[in-house]
Image: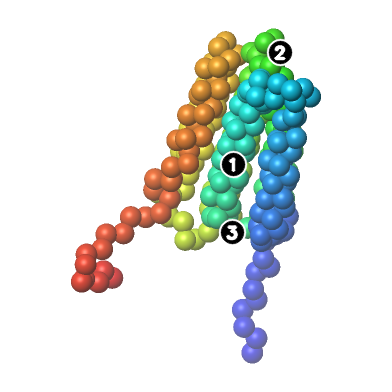
Amino acid sequence: MTGPAREPEKPAPFGIERDPARVIAFSDAVIAIAITLLVLEIRPPHDTRRLPQGLAALWPSYLAYVVTFMLIGQVWANHHIMFDHIRRADRVVLFLNTLLLMDIAFLPFAASVLAEAFRDGHGQRTAVLLHGIAFELAAVLFNVIWWCARHDRRLLSDTLHEAGVTAIGRRFRLALVWLGAGTVSGAVFPLLGVVVFCAFVIYFWLPVAGEIPKVRRRRGHRERP
């Protein structure tokens, strides 16, 4: 006797779901290249007879380098936070991640424009706006990727509880608002926009509350099941 016929497996709606390990490796490589290219914008002074003054005059380049480096570092950290909990990547996630990497590869140019504008004293509003829009686009893509991954929990790891899913999503939405506020304020007051971006970097290095469930332990006592 033959057993009951099994129903054929339904194909995934967006193609084969792949292990995201190669996605993470490729993303790390692109981010590493982008973050390294930032230092090429800092060019040494030509007049070495007045080297201290020449180095001091490069402060716009230092500012653009530090702010952009730390913001890209945030992108890298949040990318790992996100893909730590994505167990499979379909074609939609691959496409959205490619758009994210394309945006990241553009950031050294945005940093160069920012430094040049502050150095010349003209176009600071436009430069901060361009810089902010580039990072705002990255925040949008983070939110869209996370929404796709958490939809029906089809692509998410089973080890992440619902509170963690909500906490990560809340953090990504906050980044969207925060960077948007910095972009808008920078279009009016350029230095204020830069300050908002710096505050963003400081705050977002804090751990995501709720991502890891709190476990209360008492000394000398084991947890009851």
* Residue corresponding to mark 3: 87
Q: Nearer the viewer, mark 1 or mark 2?
A: 2
Q: Residue at x 61, y 26 (%)?
A: 63
Residue 9, x across and y down, in percent: 67, 65
Q: Residues within 10 Å of mark 1 (few under 14, many from 20)?
A: some
Amino acid carrying mark 2 in the image: Asp
Distance (Cα) linking label 1 and label 2: 27 Å
Instruction: Name the residue type under label 3.
Output: Arg
For this rendering, which residue is in front, 217 or 167?
Answer: 217
Residue 16 x, y percent position in the rendering: 72, 58
- Closer to the N terminus: mark 1 or mark 2? 1
The N terminus lies in which quarter of the figure? bottom right
| Residue plotted at (43% across, 46% down) | 207
Residue 53 occupies which quadrant of the picture? Answer: top right
Residue 88 in the image: x percent, y percent?
63, 58
How packed mark 3 is, by other alpha carbons closer than 10 Å (few <14, some 14-19, many 20 or more), is some
Q: Is residue 2 above or below residue 98?
A: below
In this view, the mark in front (2 or 3): 2
Q: Which residue is drawn at 58% across and 15% down?
A: 190
Look at the picture and state if 44 lies above or below 145. above
Mark 2, residues whose alpha carbon is within 10 Å: few (<14), some, or many (≥20)? few
Question: Disc 2 designates what residue?
Answer: 120
Q: Is residue 220 left or right of residue 203?
A: left
Residue 73 is labelled as: 1
Q: Which of marks 2 and 3 is nearer the N terminus?
A: 3
The label number, if any, that marks residue 53 in the structure image: none
* Residues under numbered marks 3 and 1 in contact, where contact means CB atoms less than 8 Å apart: no
Residue 190 in view in this figure: yes
The location of residue 179, given as percent across then percent down, is 55, 27
